[in-house]
């Protein structure tokens, strides 16, 4: 079968992100003997013309990958749905093929999106196996095998709890993509060593998307993929997209030892959970090229960590952050302000902890995006923040009633007094223009590392003219 795969994501903040999910889909379909073409819209100068040209391939099926629904940023929330609607419109005008949609953005509100976008098929969660089976049925003109993760237009929709999970993790196929653009304009390529997260933070979608059971790849395969990225794609920096890079810690250590022992020259960064970061593991990570660590810390208040059901304590955060400072590893704490129970006192505790730890950077998000199937959705319903029929494919944010109307001012004022704080929603130390200017200097890695350098050079925090 001839299949056109389209990555609709054009977001360039905080950097353009290689569509790894679609590269996995490409691998599965190619392995099934199908002919694939890819249209990645991220760097397209003229989306309509490029899409029309792509359909000259006369595909039998068009697969759309929807990574992001919106930018998760309050109060400057931006939904990408309009862009998706335009892409679908052009596909319909220039081709008669059926449309199938998948991706993390799609999987977070699948029924609503299937209806809203009027698409033929939707696949929830990991698409490799279900899409391959759908394509086989369509090609052989056989009845489509039912699956709880496959939504079909005008058919009764199955009840959904979480997304599909594949039984075997394979290797993505990046050959049909322009990886160089991502390396040059995004400063890195990406790689996945495992899927799944066993924890239950109240707002988080990751266990819904990837499941609660951690599925590990073979270390040999990951090493081979890293070598391929270096030798064939010219990569010198990667981002491990795993929900938690250092869980289980034994796997992370095994992988880092191999990278170090085989003297593979690569720099990388990843999401890290503070509770599983021992000094030994961090030393191996540094030996293996770790250049930056991102902690999903959320808060510096013990009460808020409990409310969010985090798997670690303030002491774990302090210990892990101090370890990074001791071993000179750039590290950044991601914070969420305004969750259930947040008040001025818990905010104060968080600023105090960050001042004490003095990390390379702090990234603060205001409000928490509410998603279907999370505990935060239940809390929001019970507190009347959303209604039973609120359509969560559009962004809705939870903001603690104690801070309504004041959160932006409280955080903005304090963040501006601190050099290493980045607040995307208030455009403090981050704007698209600034990021793109910096990338012109071929900077590698996440740009928060640069804020740390600015801090050392004593540059004042930047606030854009809003
Ligand atoms: C790593 C990560 C990042 C890193 C990326 C670094 C890098 N260079 O890769 C960073 C921190 C930079 C980042 C930034 C952002 N991210 Co992010 N990120 C993730 C994360 C944890 C993993 C993404 C990933 O690579 N997964 C691995 C691949 C293999 O999986 P996948 O893409 O889902 O693909 C599978 C399926 O979705 C499906 N599939 C995919 N395409 C298709 C197509 C078809 C046809 C089918 C059938 C199936 C299918 O099959 C694939 C293979 O199994 C996810 C959460 C998660 N656990 O998924 C959030 C996530 C994707 N991010 C999200 C968002 C919003 C963002 C930002 C907008 C946030 C911000 N304001 O900065 C930016 C956008 C960046 C950009 N330019 O697009 C949201 C998207 C949903 C939403 N709310 O809109 C997610 C889901 C997190 C969340 N809150 O729920 N992100
Ligand atoms: S925030 Fe991190 S630890 Fe918590 S559920 Fe999400 S991925 Fe897992």
Image (spheres, grey):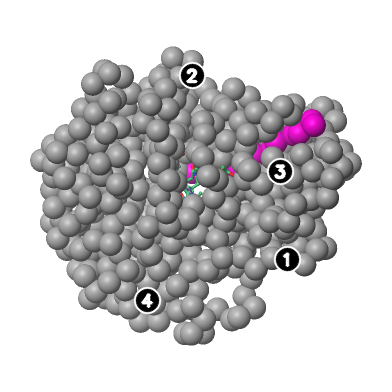
Residue identified by numbered label 2 = 233
**Marks 4,3: beta carbons within 8 A:** no
Q: Which mark is first along the chain, 2 or 3?
A: 3
Residue identified by numbered label 1 = 157
**Marks 1,3: beta carbons within 8 A:** no
Residue identified by numbered label 3 = 133
Q: Which mark is first along the chain, 2 or 4?
A: 2
Residue 452 visible (yes or no): no
Q: Is residue 9 magenta?
A: yes
- Residue stretch rendered in magenta on the structure: 1-13
Return the residue found at the far top: 231
Percent x, y for residue 209? 52, 55
Q: Which mark is first along the chain, 3 or 4?
A: 3
Residue identified by numbered label 4 = 340
Q: Which residue is rendered at x = 63% and y = 43% of the image?
A: 129
Tell me the distance, in whole angstroms, between the alpha carbons under discs 3 and 2.
Answer: 31 Å
Q: In the shown orientation, is residue 248 left or right of residue 34? A: left
């Amino acid at each position: 079968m001839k299949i056109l795969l389209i990555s609709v994501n054009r977001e360039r903040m905080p950097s353009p992100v290689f569509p790894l999910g679609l590269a996995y889909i490409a691998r599965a379909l190619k392995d099934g003997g199908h002919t694939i073409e890819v249209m990645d819209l991220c760097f397209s100068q003229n989306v309509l013309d490029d899409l029309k040209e792509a359909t000259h391939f006369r595909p039998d099926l068009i697969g759309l990958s929807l990574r992001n629904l919106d930018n998760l940023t309050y109060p400057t929330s931006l939904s990408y749905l309009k862009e998706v609607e335009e892409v679908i419109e052009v596909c319909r005008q220039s081709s008669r093929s059926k449309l199938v949609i998948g991706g993390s953005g799609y999987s977070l509100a699948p029924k609503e999106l299937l209806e809203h976008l009027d698409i033929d098929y939707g696949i929830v969660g990991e698409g490799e196996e279900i899409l391959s089976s759908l394509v086989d049925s369509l090609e052989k003109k056989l009845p489509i095998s039912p699956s709880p993760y496959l939504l079909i237009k005008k058919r009764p929709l199955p009840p959904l709890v979480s997304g599909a999970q594949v039984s075997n993790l394979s290797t993505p196929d990046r050959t049909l993509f322009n990886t160089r653009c991502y390396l040059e304009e995004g400063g890195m390529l990406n790689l996945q060593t495992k899927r799944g997260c066993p924890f239950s933070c109240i707002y988080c979608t990751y266990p819904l998307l990837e499941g609660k059971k951690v599925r590990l790849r073979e270390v040999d395969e990951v090493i081979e993929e890293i070598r391929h990225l270096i030798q064939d794609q010219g990569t010198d920096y990667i981002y491990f997209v795993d929900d938690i890079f250092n869980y289980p810690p034994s796997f992370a250590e095994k992988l880092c030892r191999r990278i170090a022992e085989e003297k593979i020259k690569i720099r990388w960064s990843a999401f890290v959970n503070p509770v599983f970061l021992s000094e030994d593991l961090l030393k191996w990570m540094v030996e293996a090229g770790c250049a930056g660590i991102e902690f999903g810390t959320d808060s510096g208040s013990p009460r808020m960590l409990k409310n969010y059901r985090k798997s670690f304590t303030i002491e774990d955060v302090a210990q892990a952050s101090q370890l990074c400072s001791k071993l000179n590893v750039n590290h950044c704490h991601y914070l969420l302000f305004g969750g259930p129970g947040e008040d001025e006192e818990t905010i104060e505790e968080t600023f105090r902890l960050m001042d004490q730890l003095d990390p390379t950077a702090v990234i603060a998000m205001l409000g928490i995006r509410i998603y279907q199937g999370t505990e935060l959705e239940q809390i929001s319903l019970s507190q009347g923040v959303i209604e039973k029929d609120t359509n969560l494919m559009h962004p809705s944010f939870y903001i603690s009633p104690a801070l309504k109307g004041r959160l932006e001012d409280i955080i903005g004022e304090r963040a501006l007094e601190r050099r290493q704080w980045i607040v995307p929603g208030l455009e403090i130390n981050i704007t698209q223009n600034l990021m793109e200017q910096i990338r012109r200097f071929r900077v590698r890695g996440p740009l928060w590392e640069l804020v740390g350098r600015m801090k050392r050079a004593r540059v004042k925090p930047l606030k854009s003219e809003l």
